[in-house]
Amino acid sequence: MATKSTTSATTTVTLAAAHKHQGKDYPAGAKLTVSLETAAWLQANGVVKPDEDAAADSAKTTTQESK
C-alpha cells in the first residue's frame, strides 16, 4: 500500500499587499514560507511581489543575450 508523503517543497514569498493567510492577517512586505502551489496561486493573483532572485536572473540572461 502506498503512503502519502507529508513533505513538500516550500518557498518564501513577500506580500505585495496586506493578506490573510491561514486565518492570520499579514501586512504588505511580510515574508511567508508557503508550498510551491500556494506561491504560484499567490503570484497569479497579484498577492505577492515577483521573485526578486528570478527577476535578477532574468535580467542577467536578457543582458547576456543582448551582447
Image: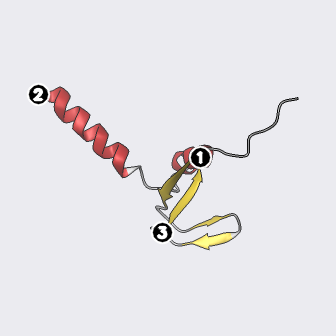
**Residue tagged 2:** 67
Query: What amino acid is labelled 1 in the image?
Result: Trp
* SS for dot 3: loop
CA separation, marks 2 and 3? 37 Å
User: Which image quarter is the C terminus in?
Assistant: top left
Instruction: Tell me which numbered mark, 2 or 3, is placed earlier along the sequence.
Output: 3
Q: Residue furthest left?
A: 67
Q: Residues within 10 Å of mark 2 (few under 14, many from 20)?
A: few
Q: Would residue 2 be found to the left or right of residue 6 on screen?
A: right
Which SS class for mark 1? helix
All told, the count of numbered labels is 3
Quote the CA–CA distance across marks 1 and 2: 35 Å
Chain-order first, disc 1 or disc 2: 1
Q: What label does residue 28 carry, if any?
A: 3
Furthest residue to the front?
1
- Residue 60: image x %, image y %? 23, 38
- Report the front residue among 7 and 64: 7
Residues at marks 1 and 3, CA–CA distance in whole angstroms: 17 Å
Q: Where is mark 1, residue-wise?
A: 41
Please provide percent x and percent y for residue 9: 59, 44
Q: Is residue 39 left or right of residue 55?
A: right
